[in-house]
Image (tube, helix red, strand yellow):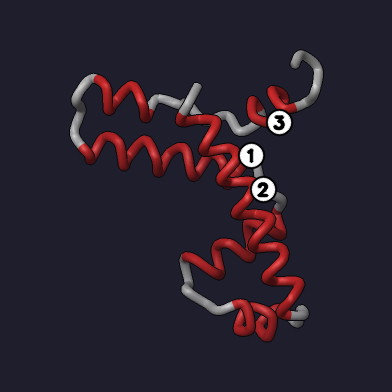
Amino acid sequence: MVGDGRFERHRACGTQGSIGLLQETGETNDLVRAQMRRDLRRAMEDSVTPRQRELLLLRYEEGLSHVAIARRLGLDPSSVSRTVRRGERNLRRCLRFARYR
């Protein structure tokens, strides 16, 4: 459907969407992983809010639990959980679109 906003949201992700092409041409897993990392970095920049990015990095790069993040930042654990979940959803949508373009 033209004009429903979905294309514009996904286009904002800015990912290259070449994972499928790499697999079809028989490139190595290293190239696929490198492309996935680039797509993830771009999606982190373009498809999540600064707060979501901050909490996702604390969760996955530092390995902190939602409770530990909440204590560190003075937030309610349920707010941390909800924000992380929304950020994951935004990333998943963006990366899913990149894979099938």
**Residue 12 appears left or right of 38:** right
Residue type beneath disc 1: Asp
Q: Position of residue 75 (x, y in %)?
A: 76, 78
Of 4 and 14, nearer the camera is 4
Q: Position of residue 54 (x, y in %)?
A: 63, 62
- The image shows residue 67, relative to residue 37, as above or below, that is below
Q: How far apart, in angstroms, are the residues tagged by discs 3 and 1?
A: 10 Å
Disc 2 secondary structure class? loop
* Disc nearer the start of the sequence (3/1): 3
- The image shows residue 82, relative to residue 25, as above or below, that is below
Residue type beneath disc 2: Val
Disc 1 secondary structure class? helix
Image label count: 3
* Disc nearer the start of the sequence (3/2): 3
Rendering quarter of residue 73 = bottom right
Name the residue carrying label 2. Answer: 48
Q: How far apart, in angstroms, are the residues tagged by discs 1 and 2?
A: 6 Å
Q: Residue at x 39, y 25 (%)?
A: 18
Residue at the farthest right position: 3
Of 35 and 92, nearer the camera is 92
**Image mark for residue 46:** 1
Q: Residue at x 56, y 45 (%)?
A: 92
Asked if labels 2 and 3 touch by Cβ distance under 8 angstroms, the answer is: no
Q: Residue at x 75, y 16 (%)?
A: 1
- The image shows residue 83, relative to residue 90, as above or below, that is below
Name the residue carrying label 3. Answer: 9
Q: Residue at x 60, y 54 (%)?
A: 88
Disc 3 secondary structure class? helix
Residue type beneath disc 3: Arg
